[in-house]
Image (tube, coloured by chain):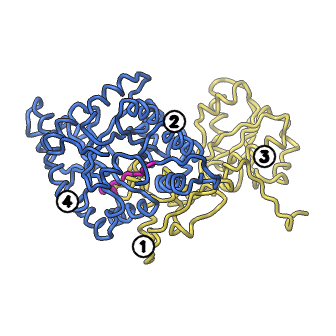
Chain colours: A blue, B yellow
Amino acid sequence: MKTNSRIEKILGQGGFVVTSECGPPRGADSEVVRKKGELLRGVVDAVNVTDNQTAVVRMSSLAACAILKGMGLEPILQMVCRDRNRIALQSDILGAAALGINNVLCLSGDHQKFGDHPQGKNVYDIDSIQLIQTVCRMRDEGRFLGGEEIKGKPLMFVGAAENPFADPFEIRAARLGKKMKAGCEFIQTQCIYNMERFSRWMEMVCERGFHEKCAVLAGVTPFKTAGMANYMKKNVPGMDVPDEMIERMKGVPKEKQAEEGIKICVEQIQQLREIPGVRGIHIMAIEWEAKVEEIVKAAGLFPRPEIE
Amino acid sequence: MIVGNRKDFKEILEKLGPRRRVLVLGCNECVTVCGVGGEREVGVLASELRLFWKKEGETFEVREHTLERQCDCEYIDQIRGFADEYDVILSMACGAGVQYVSEAYKTKLVLPAVNTTFLGVTIEQGVWSERCQGCGACILDMTAGVCPIARCAKSLLNGPCGGSSGGKCEIDNETDCAWQLIVDRLKESGQMERYEEILPVKDWRSGREGGPRKRVREDLKL
């Protein structure tokens, strides 16, 4: 074990990991984070805290992680390269480790065009793969990017995202390989709706043995409505929602659509668990944290394992 | 070449304010090639000004003049004889030209009539596209001749991101994904194994981040 990460421990004992997500509020009210945290307590192994997702300003991921940590949950600090240069990123990694945060997820971040400050300048001093390298170097070699020694290494379990549905498809497994080579220990995927394409990607990953060094957690997002399914297909970059899934949502009366969305999600989890190489599930219930418990239980993933 | 867009006529009028003696100054280099600030465009803008003020019943004097370059003082000096007759020099050069004219005529108001946009190429008649951001440390040998710094919306050295779809960038479907282009070229040239290499963190000091840049060539100095 390199870190105190709960997910590293579960993976280390051969367990199947379940993570979920908590989007910080668009304000300074810590109660919002606490309420979401309460809904996820004991239900999942770790909770991602998004970093100004879709480039919309929110409470900082680090602050919300600290709140969740204080409640006894296991946060995963999401970090995007859009808003901070190498100085600020490394500084926040040290700060996170000092607050007892054990996991980091290294991301490029959505372009600011999609957010509430499209007039802003982006940073991209380093990219997500280079951020993985940076955190691993800080932890393993005790050195900053600039080469200076770190006094008190940040012991972070390092993850990243991968989108099997983005193009070009043929390099998507190789891209995971690059992240693994950079030091990435777990991957959470983009929301999976196209099971066939995900299976093909997973085959490519397993053929090259990447899954052995880098645990793949398959991402799912339940639909609340048919409208949401349609919106995700049309407006969310890199999302692949098959038409038959939208049709299935549309085929149900409006008041029953949420229930159908949960049902689809549970079925997907069951299918994903059967795919070789999948080491866990990442449930992104967007502003719907109240349903995560129901999903985890219905999918037969409850109770969560104890760790020493 | 340096590519630009002419500012809106309304904005130019606002910047001119009450000044009516205007020297519209073109440049025969890049801005001529991209059809924004050469002799022809100087004529168009000068005519627009004359027509507008004539309609308003105002008294004015608009002179047209185009220099070989606005980024060399030997050419800028050519207007010394008559620049003083005007309230304002309305430069149609790139931002470098506007500044250099301004430096040469310190007592004169020099205004930009053009928004300088990028270093690019001519795709077809009337279409230009960005290619370079002048980072000062070229990596095109490592990226199959496609620059991700200039052409990826996130300047990713290890792309593509998760927003690449059907060869297009997540920011809009008119913009090519630079990393799709890189992967295509690697494939075409039988170098796909190069995709597996991780490009290291960039030293940005050779670019704007290192502060304003200056180049001195002792061998060329007189």
Q: Have a look at marks 1 and 2 and say if they share a chain.
A: no
Amino acid at dot 3: Tyr
Marks 4 and 2, the one that precedes in the sequence: 2
Residues B83 and A9: in front is: A9
Q: Are marks 1 and 4 in contact (CB under 8 Å)?
A: no
How far apart, in angstroms, are the residues tagged by discs 4 and 2? 43 Å
How far apart, in angstroms, are the residues tagged by discs 3 and 1? 46 Å
Tell me the mark number nearer the camera, choosing from 4 and 3: 4
Label 2 lies in what chain? Answer: A
Q: Which residues are magenta?
A: A156-166
Amino acid at dot 1: Met
> As drawn, is B183 to the left or to the right of A90?
left
Q: Residue at image x 12%, y 44%? A: A247
Q: Where does label 4 land, which residue? A: A275
Q: Secondary structure at mark 2?
A: loop
**Circle number at residue B192:** 1
Q: Position of residue B88 (x, y in %)?
A: 77, 34
Q: Position of residue A175 (x, y in %)?
A: 39, 62
How far apart, in angstroms, are the residues tagged by discs 1 and 4? 28 Å
On screen, B199 above or below A109?
Answer: below
